[in-house]
Image: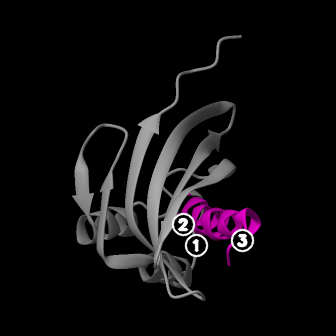
Amino acid sequence: MSDISGLTEVVAAFHWDLAEWLGSDAPPKVFDRLSVALDEGFTSVVTTGQAVDRETLLAGLWSARNVQPGLEIGVSDVSEIARSGNLIVVRFAAENQLGETRTTRWVTAVLVTDGRTYLWRTVHETAAPAESS
C-alpha cells in the first residue's frame, strides 16, 4: 500500500473500532482487533501530555467499554509525512463526536508494515484549538 487512500483506510478502521469499543456494548472481538493492531513496543503521548505504554493503554481501554455511548470518531486530513523501510509516519485529524459535542485532535503516528499488515508503533496527540463560531 503506497497510496494515501490505503493509509486512510488503515487509520479510519482503527478509529472505527475504537469508537465502537468506547461507544457501545461491543463484543470482545472489537477489543481484540484494537489489541492486535498495536505493536509490542507501542507507546502513546495523549493530549494531557501523559506517556503510556501498550499494556497501560490496553488496560484502560478494556475498562472503558461503552463508557461514552454513541461516540463517533471521524478521521480526516490524512497525510504521509515520511516513509523509510518498514516505517511510515502519518498525520491526521481525529474528531470525537458525542451528541452535539465535538473535540478534535491532531495525531502523528508511526506505523510498522510488512506491506500487508500495519501495526501502530507510536502515537502523539495534540488537542486542536476549538473553532470559534
> Can you name the residue that lies furthest to the front here?
84
Q: Which circle, 1 or 3, is nearer the viewer?
A: 3
- In the figure, 56 relative to 116: above or below? above
Query: Which mark is first along the chain, 2 or 3?
Result: 3
User: Type of residue at label 2?
Assistant: Trp
Mark pair 3, 2: CA separation: 23 Å
Q: Is residue 97 magenta?
A: no
User: Type of residue at label 3?
Assistant: Gly
- Please name whichever residue, 7 or 126, is drawn nearer the observer in this view of the structure: 7
Q: Is residue 63 left or right of residue 10?
A: left
- The range drawn in magenta is 1-22
- Residue linked to disc 3: 6
Secondary element at tag 1:
loop
Q: Is residue 13 magenta?
A: yes
- In the figure, 41 relative to 53: above or below? below
User: Type of residue at label 1?
Assistant: Ala
Q: Point out residue 127 in the picture as x, y percentages from the top left corner.
A: 46, 33
- Please name whichever residue, 42 or 65, is drawn nearer the observer in this view of the structure: 42
Residue at image location 59% in from the left, 46% down from the top: 94
Colour scheme used in the picture?
Answer: one colour
- Please name whichever residue, 38 or 22, is drawn nearer the observer in this view of the structure: 38
Q: Are marks 1 and 2 in contact (CB under 8 Å)?
A: yes
Mark pair 1, 3: CA separation: 25 Å
- Please name whichever residue, 20 or 79, is drawn nearer the observer in this view of the structure: 79
- Residue linked to disc 2: 21
Q: Is residue 121 left or right of residue 108?
A: left
Query: Which mark is first along the chain, 3 or 1?
Result: 3
- Residue linked to disc 1: 26
Q: Which circle, 3 or 2, is nearer the viewer?
A: 3
Residue at image location 69% in from the left, 62% down from the top: 8
